Image (tube, rainbow, N blue to C red):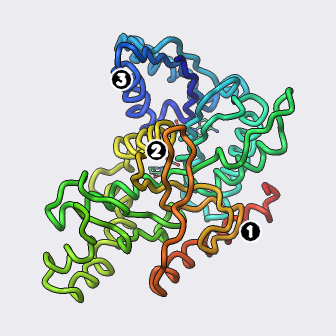
């Protein structure tokens, strides 16, 4: 099988990890599978020349699965016929820019890319938005794809647009594993809700460690249920939500390799299924858990082996969980209102 994947922001830091892992993973597939990939690398015109260096290094890896590389500054060329698009590039926040300025700069980018995906991508293509503000960028791209159907009349469904909260999910897994001493693999049913911002809610309410409720394990480790609750509210949640900033402070640059790794986790799970395990993904709400329809919000999701993703339903939420989810969803609604005021929706 040959898949065509587009990666935007392809000369940037995240892409520098992502592209090589993507090609390496495809090259490691079982001999009988013979997966092949074609890459379309999109950049802004000012740095598209630098992409040639990335292409040279990809070529120098001699990845058996890598069939072709196209470098371009034209979204239509980048997205024509793609099976997946990883939208990593976005306008960075510059000094003096407020949130509205950032939304304005990114709204224009994601509206244009959404249109090019609508007219050009495979009608079942998977779109993963990484560039911030990721949820609202995904919302804008999805909306513009609906307005620009393919020549054959097929429409790339808004449900095929997702945003990345898997890095937050992975950060939460790592924190819980470190506190309890349990292997990451033994942790299940952990969830990130809401926006990929510091209002997100990393939720251990349903989490289990080797089948035992995580809060029970934490109560043992922390010295009682109250101490476990205090660790979650005072340590776990702030550490996960503030992790991006903490990495910048220590590394002097934002998370790149971990973001690339999480992007691949998201795409792999969405393509091959989660075998009943939960994965956090920001997907289009159909009103689940009272999240207004149309918003792209993070939920616990499961993906069937055929690649169909759905929100885990039927969870009983406490008042505390409800209020934390509502706070993050309120921020998503504000971002949607701002995008509407700017004319992107
Ligand atoms: P870099 O600044 O290293 O790279 C971004 C690249 O995107 C640049 O080369 C730039 O030229 C390109 N670009 C800008 N506009 C473009 C356009 N219209 N078309 C194509 N390319 C375009 O940033 P990097 O560290 O790679 O981060 C990329 C984005 O990921 C940022 O918005 C960042 O905030 C976001 N992140 C999202 C995360 C998530 O979990 N959702 C976590 C990591 C990261 O913070």
Q: Tell me, yes or no, whether the two marked residues, 2 and 3, touch with CB atoms within 8 Å.
A: no
Numbered tag placed on residue 24 in the rendering: 3
Crowd band around label 2 with a 10 angstrom C-alpha radius: few (<14), some (14–19), many (20+): many
Label 2 vs 3, first from the N-terminus: 3
Q: Position of residue 167 (x, y in %)?
A: 40, 52
Residue drawn where x is 33% and y is 62% of the image: 172
Q: Quadrant of the C terminus?
A: bottom right
* Relative depth, front residue between 106 and 123: 123
User: Mark 2 — residue?
Assistant: 266
Numbered tag placed on residue 162 in the rendering: none
Q: Quadrant of residue 224?
A: bottom left
Residue drawn where x is 37% and y is 26% of the image: 25
Q: Position of residue 11 (x, y in %)?
A: 49, 30
Q: Quadrant of residue 332?
A: bottom right
* Relative depth, front residue between 249 and 147: 147
Q: Quadrant of residue 72?
A: top right
* Helix, strand or loop under label 3: helix
* Helix, strand or loop under label 2: helix
Image position of 133 with respect to 141: above or below = below
Q: Tell me, yes or no, whether the two marked residues, 1 and 3, touch with CB atoms within 8 Å.
A: no
Between the C-alphas of marks 1 and 3, the distance is 41 Å
User: Mark 1 — residue?
Assistant: 337
Between the C-alphas of marks 2 and 3, the distance is 17 Å
In this picture, residue 94 sits left or right of residue 189? right
* Relative depth, front residue between 252 and 150: 150
Q: Position of residue 210 (x, y in %)?
A: 22, 60
Between the C-alphas of marks 2 and 1, the distance is 28 Å
Some atom of ligand 1 lies within 8 Å of the CB belonging to the residue at label 3: no
Q: Position of residue 263 (x, y in %)?
A: 45, 42
Image position of 214 with respect to 37: above or below = below
Q: Tell me, yes or no, whether the two marked residues, 2 and 1, touch with CB atoms within 8 Å.
A: no
Label 1 vs 3, first from the N-terminus: 3
């Amino acid at each position: 099988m040959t898949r065509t994947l587009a990666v935007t922001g392809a000369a940037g830091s995240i892409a520098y990890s992502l592209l090589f892992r993507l090609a390496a993973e495809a090259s490691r597939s079982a001999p009988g599978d013979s997966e092949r990939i074609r890459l379309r690398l999109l950049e802004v015109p000012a740095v598209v020349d630098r992409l040639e260096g990335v292409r040279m290094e990809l070529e120098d890896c001699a990845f058996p699965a890598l069939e072709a590389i196209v470098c371009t500054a034209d979204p239509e060329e980048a997205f024509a016929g793609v099976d997946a698009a990883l939208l990593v590039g976005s306008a960075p926040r510059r000094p003096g820019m407020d949130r509205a300025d950032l939304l304005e700069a990114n709204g224009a980018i994601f509206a244009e890319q959404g249109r090019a995906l609508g007219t050009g991508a495979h009608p079942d293509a998977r779109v993963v938005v990484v560039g911030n503000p990721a949820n609202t960028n995904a919302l804008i791209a999805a909306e513009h794809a609906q307005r620009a159907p393919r020549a054959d009349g097929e429409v790339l469904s808004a449900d095929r647009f997702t945003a990345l909260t898997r890095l937050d999910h992975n950060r939460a897994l790592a924190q819980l594993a470190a506190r309890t001493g349990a292997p990451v693999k033994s942790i299940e049913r952990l969830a990130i809700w809401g926006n990929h911002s510091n209002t997100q809610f990393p939720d251990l309410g349903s989490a289990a460690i080797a089948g035992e409720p995580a809060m029970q394990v934490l109560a043992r480790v922390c010295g009682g249920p109250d101490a476990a609750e205090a660790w979650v509210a005072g340590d776990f949640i702030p550490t996960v939500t503030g992790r991006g900033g903490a990495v910048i402070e220590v590394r002097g640059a934002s998370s790149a390799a971990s973001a690339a790794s999480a992007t691949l986790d998201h795409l792999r799970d969405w393509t091959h299924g989660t075998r009943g395990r939960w994965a956090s993904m920001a997907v289009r709400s159909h009103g689940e858990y009272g999240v207004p329809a149309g918003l792209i919000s993070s939920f616990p999701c499961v993906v069937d082996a055929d690649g169909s993703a759905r929100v885990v339903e039927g969870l009983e939420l406490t008042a505390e969980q409800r209020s934390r989810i509502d706070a993050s969803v309120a921020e998503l609604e504000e971002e949607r209102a701002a995008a509407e005021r700017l004319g992107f929706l």
